[in-house]
Amino acid sequence: MNTNFSSHLVRLVSRPAVSFCGLVLLVLFAFSGCATRDDNPAAAAKPAHSEIITLREGDTVKIDFPGSPNLDTTQQIRRDGKISLQLVGEVQASGLTPQELQDSLIKLYAPQIASKEITVSVESSTFPIFVTGAVVRPGKVLSDHPMTALEAVMESGGFDYATANMRSVKIIRNENGVMKHYTVNLKRVLDGDKDEAPFYLKPQDIIYVPERFELF
């Protein structure tokens, strides 16, 4: 594996803001990155909002009780993945879809309220992206909206234009336990090439901007 890239990973891992899950992805990539092939970026470039929403810490959920409006609440999911509700106490929310949380609450409140109608909606949602390599401020980027690879780089201060290879930016993604690698040409995006579709990111994606003339 290229020593320059390894040093980039070490610097990113040392940052306290990187989550444990992100660290795991980095370690897996460090051992497997050189052997895996690049997948087709066009097949992975769907906007994040086209995916089924899975709740995570930091998301804000609104819970309505049409038959008992005094129980209505809007809360941010805590770091432990839970929210606190009247009558039933602590409830796990992270890792569930809004529908799954809604079904769980209907069961929990069944002995407490007459109405079986409860609705759960997402008020806001944030997810982490990790950016490393030849950018101004490598580290974690939090987004509350569908974000492209170029937008994530700009959130990290932009490219280090003295060294960055914008034509061969790598995205590393964990899909069902399988590490997938994609290569995108962000120089063409910056140049306004209409044939270069925006690459939309998913939670925990890692973006690596290599240096020019770096073997990868």
Image (tube, helix red, strand yellow):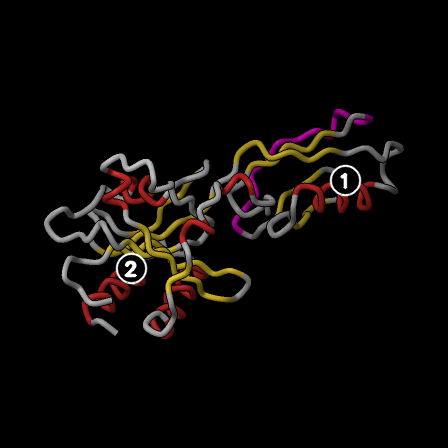
Q: Nearer the viewer, residue 132 or 18?
A: 132
Q: From this view, report whether residue 172 is shown above or below residue 30.
A: above
Q: From this view, report whether residue 72 is shown above or below residue 22.
A: above
Q: Position of residue 60 (x, y in %)?
A: 56, 36
Horizontal side of residue 190 vs 18, given as left or right: left
- Residue kind at label 2, given as amino acid type: Leu
Query: Who comes first in sequence, dot 1 or dot 2?
Result: 2
Kindly indicate whether the residue at mark 2 contacts the one at mark 1 (C-beta within 8 angstroms): no
Q: Secondary structure at mark 2?
A: helix
Q: Position of residue 128 (x, y in %)?
A: 42, 48
Label 1: how many residues lie within 10 Å, few (<14), some (14-19) or many (20+)? Answer: few
Magenta segment range? 67-79
Q: Nearer the viewer, residue 134 or 45?
A: 45
Tell which residue pokes out farthest to the left in this image.
162
Q: Secondary structure at mark 1?
A: loop
- The residue that mark 1 highlights is 87
As measured in the structure, the alpha-carbon distance from the residue carrying label 1 to the one carrying label 2 is 43 Å
Q: Position of residue 187 (x, y in %)?
A: 23, 44
Q: Nearer the viewer, residue 114 or 197?
A: 197
Quadrant (top left/top right/bottom left/bottom right) for the N terminus: bottom left
Residue 112 lies in the magenta stretch: no
Quadrant (top left/top right/bottom left/bottom right) for the C terminus: bottom left
Residue 77 lies in the magenta stretch: yes
Tell me what residue is drawn at x 38 percent, y 41 percent. Answer: 197
- The residue that mark 2 highlights is 12
Label 2: how many residues lie within 10 Å, few (<14), some (14-19) or many (20+)? Answer: many
Tell me what residue is drawn at x 32 percent, y 63 percent. Answer: 13
Q: Nearer the viewer, residue 197 or 149?
A: 197
Horizontal side of residue 68 vs 15, given as left or right: right
